[in-house]
């Protein structure tokens, strides 16, 4: 009954919106489809900073917080709040690194990101992101799939479903992880959910073979592989003629993609062939699966027409429970690992004429508290902050976003949003808009509902973020 | 005090209203006021409870109108509209026609009240306040329908207010013009002998039957209200 | 038994008492008075000017956050915020706006309360007005709650939020325009698979990416695109063998907005005219 009532509400809200047709021939599930309206961005490079980087050590300059460093946290901050680890009355924690203004717009930035700082006038900050999830995996799922639970299609899958991909010799959605380690949310973060499996993100390795078992095994030549695929294709063709299951055609198409990828994916991943100056700019070093290497690969993939490239870096969970989680140790390492490569990626995109139509997104899954974490009510050996779903900062750059923009605001202690909150679904709606898609019309029928990335609550396109 | 057996021709007052009818009348008065204030002040839980109580009472009163005491029965007081107009006409001419129970015009007033209250309670079940409150059966209809029913719920209330006004005008007409205290009768259940037609002898159904019916109606109302 | 008052006297009394009660109700509840006058057709609402600050900035906020309960469908607290006259009239407790004094206006007080307050509007669970939204209402009231004053006359109002309206998808127009060059387009798409695409579903403009064709794409191929030249708005010839000989062909693509031409044989000199006319050229040279 409740569902019927909600259904009638939803029906009323979306009565004027007709989903677009995203059907393609079964043998070409990744064929490019034009967006609904002229896009500002043609591809996405999503830099996922898993673990939630502290906005208060990077972009949020809060002199008041520094002033009250070490003081007991105001009771109003704690009332009705739920924390992962903080208990009792924690102390406020001022920024651990000095801040200064940079660029034409005079945006504040800490001393941890000297390379990124050179691009600061190109960045569009949203300082008022909020989520309702305060644990990593569900919060990451919410950012990546629009839902905190498993089973929903990832942002990259939606984009690939909606737009297809330009280069049929590569997957439309490629995922690279630093050191091959998956974030807390797991592979669901690039999963297809209820969308056909072909729209799933393909996780490539930036070290060794990009895709395992892509290469022909010893003794199998490419012509032999071709003949084998032709035979399998013929048999599958018979099966399809008999049962007409589109999955059969999809499977054949996957074999063919893998065959084409054998050459193109290997070439795309072959970043060591880049000029030494370019490699040095990223700090890319062969023999490791570093974020730097992945950034360079991301640019190569973007150039080759891959629609959605997602880089996952990890280790930002600066609770202060260990060296690696300390704001003054592990956090600084994370900054070092990512600062130069991201700056190099932005520079490279600009030089290669890709910046204007590539949407670069940098985001964690939530923010961190203005209070120092006091696990078990005790002062901890290292300095850290707990999770703050109530406010976090992300930035975007490139395709269609307003450069030098600072949107939204938190209170003087950087704890709660006081101006222009942006929900995750609003961000998704805005990103899809930049790609030329109306989030209300990018739908897929599943379980009786026209599913969409932004789900059923109304999402708004944040116009102020657009160039 | 002379209020007793209707067969007692010597008693000064004649019993005309049984306890269930009187209780129903004053409970409804109380519940209308309660519902009004509760809705006005946003105490929707109170509104829900008072509406539910009204549902039970209405079910009871309609049943009692079929099986109850003679003055409570529809068969006793629902006359033709012509009869009602004749009655009003005779009042206008200063005549003093007597009726033990409801007079023909009053009978139609009762019917109007029961109809309006039934409509009001029924629409209330399907209404919503646009915030956190929903009538117990609001989910059975679409949101649009529920909204339409809600606005009907508001309109019927104004009709109810108008009916109450008419009712009060009539009651005070009897009190001030005809010197007949209907309020007192509805409180005590009896009328002075001279205001009851000669030979009128209302028959009263046993009280326990009323309580049994009321209990069943309360059960039905409770089931309806909690059935969502 | 004493005789009662005469029926005539009684009904005169009823009329008097009823009229008094009605007058009292109308005096206590302006919204009721309005409804009564409205019923008798005695109301002539003065509409707010269409270009006024009220119409462009304040009314949309009321429409988004308030009129669901305080509008045509419901009038909670007897308050309507769907037309200016009703806004100024107020609800069952009287006016909610005191022109010129935002601080003394009940409406401002209510929309400014924290969500947890039982008197907060919109009530808990509904989307509250943002700080900027409240500031817009305050600024309007402070400036006299005028029906006609324009945005530039209202001091202290935050700039309007940029609303994005997605145009209705019009494929019919695009289809008509596309038909004009359908045949050459089909030929060229077959010749350069995956390289030529429409900018969007609602457009007949084309974007062409020849970069994946690499060295197999040269000046001759670029010249072959001639039938599409009026429609090409983006072109990528990076890594192809296109050279200075393609200058005229590119010049003929007069609607070309973006040209990406890294690692080609084209000299800066041959690209200069394109830059001069406003085409954004990426050739990897800075």
Image (cartoon, rainbow, N blue to C red):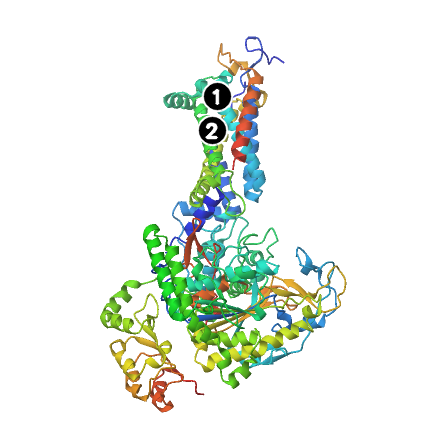
Q: Identify the residue under disc 1.
A: B65
The residue that appears at 41% across and 50% down in the rendered structure is A11
Q: Position of residue B73 (x, y in %)?
A: 47, 19
User: Helix or strand or loop: what does disc 2 sit on?
Assistant: helix
Q: Position of residue C15 (x, y in %)?
A: 46, 35
Q: Position of residue C121 (x, y in %)?
A: 55, 54
Using the rendered image of the protein, determine whether residue C13 is visible from the camera's viewpoint. no
Q: Identify the residue under disc 2.
A: B114
Count of marks, rendered view: 2
The residue that appears at 34% across and 52% down in the rendered structure is A244
Q: Are marks 2 and 1 in contact (CB under 8 Å)?
A: yes
Q: Position of residue C27 (x, y in %)?
A: 51, 47
The earlier-in-sequence mark between 2 and 1 is 1
**Residue found at the far bottom of this picture:** C269
Image-quadrant location for residue A375: bottom right
Relative to B139, does residue A76 appear above or below in the rendering? below
């Amino acid at each position: 009954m409740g569902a019927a009532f909600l259904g009638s509400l939803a029906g009323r809200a979306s009565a004027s919106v007709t989903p677009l047709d995203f059907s393609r021939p079964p043998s070409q599930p990744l064929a490019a489809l034009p967006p609904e309206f002229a896009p500002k961005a043609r591809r996405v490079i999503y830099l996922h900073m898993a673990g939630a980087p502290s906005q208060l050590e990077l972009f949020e300059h809060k002199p008041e917080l520094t002033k009250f460093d070490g003081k007991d946290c105001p009771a109003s901050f704690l009332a009705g709040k739920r924390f992962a680890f903080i208990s009792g009355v924690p102390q406020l924690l001022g920024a651990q690194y000095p801040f200064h203004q940079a660029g034409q717009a005079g945006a504040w930035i800490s001393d941890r990101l000297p390379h990124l700082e050179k691009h600061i006038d190109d960045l569009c900050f949203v300082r008022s992101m909020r989520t309702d999830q305060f644990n990593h995996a569900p919060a990451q799922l919410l950012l990546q799939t629009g839902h905190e639970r498993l089973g929903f299609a990832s942002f990259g899958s939606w984009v690939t479903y909606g737009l297809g991909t330009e280069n049929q010799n590569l997957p439309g959605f490629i995922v690279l992880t630093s050191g091959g380690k998956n974030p807390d949310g797991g592979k669901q973060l690039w999963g297809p959910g209820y969308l056909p499996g072909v729209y799933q993100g393909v996780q490539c390795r930036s070290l060794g073979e990009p895709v395992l078992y892509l290469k022909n095994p010893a003794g199998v030549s490419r012509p032999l592989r071709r003949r084998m695929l032709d035979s399998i294709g013929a048999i599958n063709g018979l099966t399809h003629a008999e049962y007409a299951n589109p999955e059969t055609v999809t499977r054949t198409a996957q074999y063919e993609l893998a065959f084409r990828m054998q050459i193109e994916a290997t070439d795309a991943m072959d970043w060591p062939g880049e000029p030494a100056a370019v490699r040095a700019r990223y700090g890319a070093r062969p023999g490791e699966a570093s974020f730097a290497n992945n950034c360079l690969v991301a640019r190569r993939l973007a150039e080759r027409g891959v629609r959605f490239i997602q880089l996952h870096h990890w280790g930002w969970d600066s609770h202060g429970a260990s060296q690696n989680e300390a704001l003054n140790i592990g956090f600084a390492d994370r900054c070092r690992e990512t600062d130069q490569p991201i700056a190099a990626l932005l520079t490279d995109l600009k030089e290669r004429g890709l910046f204007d139509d590539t949407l670069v997104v940098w985001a964690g899954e939530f923010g961190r508290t203005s209070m120092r974490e006091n696990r078990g009510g005790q002062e901890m050996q290292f300095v850290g902050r707990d999770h703050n779903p109530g406010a976090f900062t992300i930035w975007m750059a490139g395709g269609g976003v307003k450069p030098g923009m600072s949107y939204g605001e938190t209170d003087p202690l950087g704890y709660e949003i006081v101006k222009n909150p942006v929900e995750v679904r609003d961000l998704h709606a805005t990103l899809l808009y930049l790609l030329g898609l109306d989030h209300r019309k990018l739908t897929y029928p599943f379980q009786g509902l026209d599913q969409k990335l932004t789900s059923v609550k109304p999402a708004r396109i944040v116009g102020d973020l657009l160039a | 005090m002379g209020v007793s057996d209707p067969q007692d021709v010597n008693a000064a007052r004649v019993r005309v209203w049984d306890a269930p009818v009187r209780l129903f009348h004053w409970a409804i008065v109380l519940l209308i006021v309660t519902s009004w204030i509760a809705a006005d002040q946003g105490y929707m839980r109170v509104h829900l409870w008072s509406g539910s109580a009204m549902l039970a009472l209405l079910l009871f009163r309609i049943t009692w109108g079929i099986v109850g005491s003679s003055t409570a029965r529809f068969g006793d007081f629902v006359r033709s509209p012509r009869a009602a107009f004749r009655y009003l006409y005779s009042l206008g001419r200063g005549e003093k026609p007597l009726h033990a129970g409801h007079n023909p015009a009053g009978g139609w007033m009762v019917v109007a009240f029961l109809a309006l209250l039934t409509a009001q309670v029924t629409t209330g079940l399907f209404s919503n306040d646009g915030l956190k409150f929903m009538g117990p059966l609001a989910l059975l209809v679409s949101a649009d329908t529920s909204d339409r029913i809600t606005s009907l719920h508001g309109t019927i209330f104004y009709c109810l207010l108008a009916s109450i006004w008419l009712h009060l005008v009539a009651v005070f007409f009897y009190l001030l013009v005809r010197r007949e205290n209907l309020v007192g009768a509805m409180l005590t259940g009896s009328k002075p002998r001279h205001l009851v037609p000669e030979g009128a002898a209302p028959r009263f159904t046993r009280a326990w039957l009323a309580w049994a019916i009321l209990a069943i109606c309360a059960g039905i109302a409770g089931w309806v209200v909690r059935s969502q | 038994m004493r005789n009662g008052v005469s029926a005539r006297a009684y009904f005169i009394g009823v009329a008097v008492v009823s009229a008094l009660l009605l007058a009292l109700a109308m005096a206590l509840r302006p919204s009721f008075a309005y409804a009564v006058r409205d019923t008798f057709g005695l109301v002539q609402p003065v509409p707010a000017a269409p270009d006024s600050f009220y119409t462009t900035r304040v009314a949309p906020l009321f429409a988004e956050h308030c009129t669901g309960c305080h509008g045509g469908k419901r009038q909670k607290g007897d308050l309507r915020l769907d037309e200016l006259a009703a806004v100024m009239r107020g609800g069952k407790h009287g006016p909610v706006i005191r022109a010129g004094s935002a601080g003394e206006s009940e409406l401002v007080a209510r929309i400014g309360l924290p969500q947890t307050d039982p008197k907060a509007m919109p009530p808990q669970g509904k989307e509250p007005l943002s700080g900027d939204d409240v500031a817009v209402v305050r600024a309007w009231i402070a400036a006299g709650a005028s029906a006609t004053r324009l945005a530039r006359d209202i001091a202290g109002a935050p700039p309007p939020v940029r609303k994005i309206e997605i145009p209705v998808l019009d494929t019919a127009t695009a289809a008509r325009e596309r038909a004009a060059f359908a045949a050459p387009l089909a030929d060229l798409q077959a010749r350069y698979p995956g390289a030529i695409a429409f900018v969007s579903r609602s457009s007949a403009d084309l974007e062409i990416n020849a970069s994946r064709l690499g060295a197999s794409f040269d000046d001759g191929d670029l010249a072959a695109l001639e039938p599409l030249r009026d429609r090409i708005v983006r072109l990528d010839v990076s890594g192809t063998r296109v050279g200075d000989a393609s200058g005229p062909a590119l010049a003929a693509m007069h609607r070309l907005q973006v040209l990406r031409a890294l690692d080609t044989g084209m000299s800066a000199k041959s690209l200069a005219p394109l830059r001069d006319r406003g085409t954004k050229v990426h050739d990897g040279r800075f």
